[in-house]
Amino acid sequence: MTAAEWLASSASGAPAELVARAREWLARVPPTGNASVDLAGAGRMALGAVIDSAGGRPAAADLLAADALVTLALEARAAEDPSSLGEFAANVRRAGAS
């Protein structure tokens, strides 16, 4: 399943603005063919934008999108390769801290 498919399958019932923001961030990531990597990359980009922002409603929407994208990245990795989930999560965390 692609990152876009993960997002679409998980978007049921989510607020439209959140889904739209997450899609916008995901569209900025060059596809690698690995859903968890692509979702995590989009989440990191969204979080970076929040950190660099002046705040306000757009930043809040991006923060929620970052959270959703990273959560989906972890879900995707758990489905792709459960044995690597811990290492993947640690790498996502480290990358987000830099």
Image (cartoon, rainbow, N blue to C red):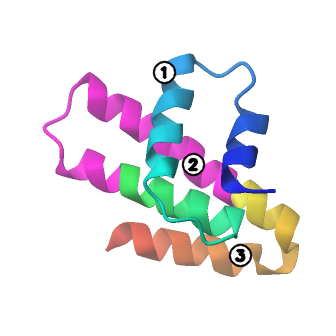
* Residue type of the residue flagged with mark 1: Glu
Residue 73: where, in percent of width, then height? 66, 58
Tag 2 or tag 1, which sits nearer the N-term?
A: 1
On whether residue 56 falls in the magenta region, the answer is yes
Against 53, is 15 above or below? above
Determine contact: label 3, label 1, CB under 8 Å: no
Task: Tell me, yes or no, whether the highlighted magenta stretch contains residue 78.
Answer: no
Identify which residue, 93 or 14, lies in the foreground: 14
Q: Which residue is mark 1?
A: 17
Quarter of the image that includes the N terminus = bottom right
Q: Residue at image x 43%, y 54%?
A: 28
- The amino acid on which the numbered mark 3 sits, given as a three-letter code, is Gly
- Identify the secondary structure beneath mark 1: helix
The residue wearing badge 2 is 69
Measured in 3D between alpha carbons, the distance from the residue under mark 1 to the one under mark 2, in whole angstroms, is 14 Å
- Mark pair 3, 1: CA separation: 30 Å
Give the percent coordinates (x, y) of residue 51: 24, 51
Dot 3 falls on a residue whose secondary structure is helix
55 in relation to 36, above or below: above
> Which residue is the site of mark 3?
86
Q: Nearer the viewer, residue 28 or 76?
A: 28
Image position of 88 (left or right of 97)? right
Q: Given the image, on which type of amino acid does mark 2 rest?
A: Leu
Question: Residue drawn 58% across and 18% down?
Answer: 15
Q: Which residues are magenta?
A: 47-73
